[in-house]
Image: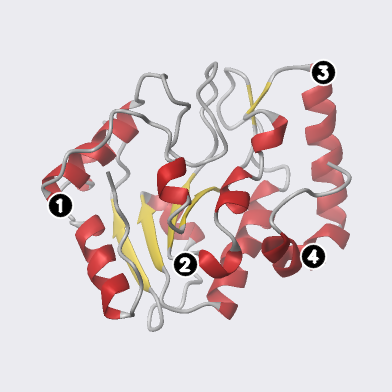
């Protein structure tokens, strides 16, 4: 991780972060863990969300917390799992809401690369996790880095749709300019709070907003 390999547009927006003390501490910790134990996602996918969704192409931001910690699940995109992996409960509920909201049938695959390639930034607040140890890489610096991403978008981009599900995501998005962007909030799609997630029609609201501002709607299938 000495050389940050990510989309040039994001590298330019975030270049000031790479000289801050926290970044050295963070990268040394993460590099050491990848060398000594099992960490998810695979190292090549740490910045996958940014690589698939360049800064100037971001239309929608969906904020998650940290990667899945089970085998073969995490692939660098929030809420997404590798193709062929059983859908996690939260993603099942996201699909249910999409089908109800838009009256469409979602695909069976949980790999959300198809959304990212359309301009949906699937952003976890924390980008790595130790195997089978949820939140094990929380509070080591990732949050500061992803806060900087949201700050950059908020400063240099307008008419972005932010989907903030649950109190954690809502706190992270508190800085967003709500006059020049669309901020959609609800409960988290986890089974523990899904009753506060269903029925908010975020996906249709998102597409209506994008269309209003001259952008192509997202195919949420």
Q: Position of residue 187 (x, y in %)?
A: 28, 48
Q: Report the side of 82 relative to 24 (left or right).
A: left
Q: Dot 1 corresponds to which residue?
A: 102
Observer-nearest residue: 116 or 144? 116
Mark 4 or mark 1: which comes first in sequence? 4
Q: Is residue 25 above or below residue 216?
A: above
- Closer-to-camera residue (186/15): 15
Q: Earlier in the sequence, mark 3 or mark 2?
A: 3
Residue indicated by mark 3: 36
Residue under label 2? 174
Residue 171 lies, in percent from the top left, at 46, 59
Q: Earlier in the sequence, mark 2 or mark 4?
A: 4
Q: Position of residue 59 (x, y in %)?
A: 43, 65
Disc number placed over residue 15 in the picture, else none: 4
Q: Is mark 1 on a helix, strand or loop?
A: helix
Question: Which of pointers 3 and 1 lies earlier in the amino acid sequence?
Answer: 3
In the image, taking residue 185 as reference, residue 13 lies left or right, namely right
**Number of the front mark, 4 or 1:** 1
Instruction: Report the Cα–Cα distance between label 2 and label 4.
Output: 23 Å
- Quarter of the rendering occupied by the N terminus: top right
Tell me if mark 1 has few (under 14), some (14-19) or many (20+) residues whose alpha carbon lies within 10 angstroms of its own.
some
Residue under the image location 25 percent in, 38 percent down: 95
């Amino acid at each position: 991780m000495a050389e940050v390999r990510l989309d040039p547009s994001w590298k330019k927006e975030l270049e000031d972060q790479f000289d801050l003390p926290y970044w050295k501490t963070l990268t040394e910790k993460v590099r050491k863990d990848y060398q000594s134990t099992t960490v998810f996602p695979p190292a090549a996918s740490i910045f996958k969300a940014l690589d698939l969704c360049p800064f100037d192409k971001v239309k929608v931001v969906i904020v998650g917390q940290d990667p899945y910690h089970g085998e073969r699940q995490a692939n660098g995109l929030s809420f997404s799992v590798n193709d062929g992996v059983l859908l996690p409960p939260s993603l099942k509920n996201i699909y249910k809401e999409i089908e109800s909201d838009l009256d469409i049938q979602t695909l069976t695959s949980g790999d959300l690369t198809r959304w990212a390639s359309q301009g949906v930034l699937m952003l976890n607040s924390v980008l790595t996790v130790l195997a089978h140890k949820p939140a094990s890489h929380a509070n080591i610096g990732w949050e500061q880095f992803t806060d900087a991403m949201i700050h950059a978008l908020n400063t240099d981009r307008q008419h972005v749709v932010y989907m903030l599900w649950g109190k954690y995501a809502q706190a992270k998005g508190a800085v967003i300019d709500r006059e020049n962007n669309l901020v959609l909030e609800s409960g988290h799609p986890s089974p523990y709070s899904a009753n506060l997630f269903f029925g908010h029609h975020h996906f249709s609201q998102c597409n209506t907003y994008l269309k209003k501002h001259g952008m192509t709607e997202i195919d949420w299938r």
